[in-house]
Image: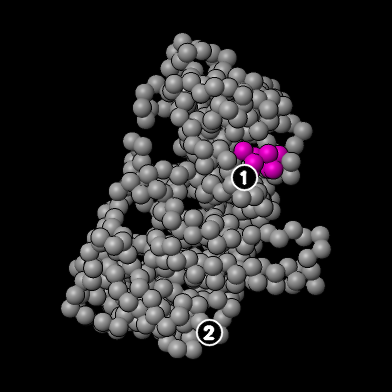
Amino acid sequence: MKGISVRRPLIGLTAYEQEVQYNGNNLIAGMLPMTYVKAVQATGGRAVLITPDDPGTDVLDSLDGIVFSGGGDIDPKYWGEELHPAADVDELRDTSELMLMKAALDRDLPLLGVCRGMQVMAVAAGGSLHQHLPDVIGHDRHRAAPGTDPLAADASAFGRHEVVLQPGSRAAALLGPSLTVNSFHHQGVNDPGTFTATGWCPDDEVIEIIEDPGRPFALGVQWHPERTGDLRVFAALAEAASRWSDRGRQVLAA
Amino acid sequence: MRRPIIGITAYVEPASWGVWQDLPTTLLPHAYTEAVMLAGGRAVLLPPDDGDTDVLRTLDGLVLAGGADLDPALYGAEAEPLTVARADRDAAELPLARAALKADLPVLGVCRGMQVLVVAAGGTLHQHLPDVLGHEKHRPAPAVYGTHDVALTAGSRIAGIMRDDLQIDCYHHQGVADPGSLLVTGRAEDGLPEAVEDPGRRFVLGVQWHPELNRDKRLFGALVDAAR
């Protein structure tokens, strides 16, 4: 590394773009909860936000890794279904993120999918989602009340559950055989496409983790690690992004 | 072909949307990203980060966006009663501005961003313009922009960019007192600096008004061209 200082990996975070209220303003903004930014910073990365209002994927040239963030529902037209009455789709993000996801997969950019982001992974890889989990599993315990922390001692049981992991999977090497997670979703992965499911909720078999062990780093989690103290998946992304960045520099230097 | 990447500094505010109430959120009005895109650049948002300024190495240009006041301690003054600062943005944006100036990266400062440029260049601010100017034309009322004409220095960069349409939209209660090492090249009719630049660098321009509101292709286009 002579002559090159160690640069933090640059991690893109896909952002919301919608009407928001702050300080008496009410306007359309690109935005993301600070929990994501802090998770990237706490694990050694530099966070930049990628807003969905731009039609290109050239921004990926600048990134060492990318997080596909949580958010609204994905339009079922992408896997050939009619829209469920309970769906609340984010068309702008669907278009932008499916395009970014395919381009990121094409170049093997290290990527982490969180909640909606994991669902974008599955859909981009040819898979499909359950549109409304209560229809499939008979309960709504994967959706915590807005603004609550399901992992807090006094929180209701809604949104808090176990995940069991596939022995031998990359996710298990990272997270161990099981963990307790927080959930805020009503869609779920039905078919992970070319990804492999490696973690489930033991109560109802809902898919909680998908990965592709053939890629440098491609991991999706259905829960929200950025809202917890357990940032292992963000740390793993940062590490993969640093390796990817170094490889890129070697290619450039050659 | 890859477009120039333009980093834009972002706000952090308690924000509400959908089912979420007052969640600490990093955000930037869509007008900025659209203005950059329409001018041929690719915008990325830069949430505050006081770690280092290495991100500039991956950027082709920088926009220092609008927002709250700067902490007067940054230019050696005590805070006055109406000054409302954001320590997280100050801690991130002053080093970014200084490093961008040092690296001669093209940079556009908008409103607060112009004030960040001025303070990074060793200048100072008026903390509440009505106390100094005796009127509120630069921020007539909450969420109301003050529209006026700007007088530009002939031959300056900003004069070449704006040409003959000199109407601007302002919304600020602080203003530039001393531009530091920058040159004042635009003024309101009350004499307040409205534009500053550094003729010795590739592209360093600060405007006290909000060119993103009308996606002003002259200003954002000039930045993106300089960033190519």
Identify which amino acid the numbered label 1 is placed on: Leu
Q: Residue at horizontal 30%, vertical 74%?
A: A161
Identify which amino acid the numbered label 2 is placed on: Pro
What residue sits right under mark 1 in the picture? B62
Q: CA distance from mark 1 to mark 2?
A: 37 Å
What residue sits right under mark 2 in the picture? A213
Q: Would residue A30 appear left or right of A213 to someone viewing this image?
A: left
Q: Quadrant of the N terminus of chain A?
A: bottom right
Q: Secondary structure at mark 2?
A: loop
Range of the magenta residues? B94-101
**Is residue B152 at all visible to an observer of this figure?**
no
**Is residue B167 at all visible to an observer of this figure?**
yes
Q: Residue at horizontal 49%, vertical 48%?
A: B34
Residue B164: x and y, percent? Answer: 58, 26
Q: Residue at horizontal 26%, vertical 64%?
A: A144
Q: Secondary structure at mark 1?
A: strand
Determine the image quadrant of residue B15.
Answer: top left
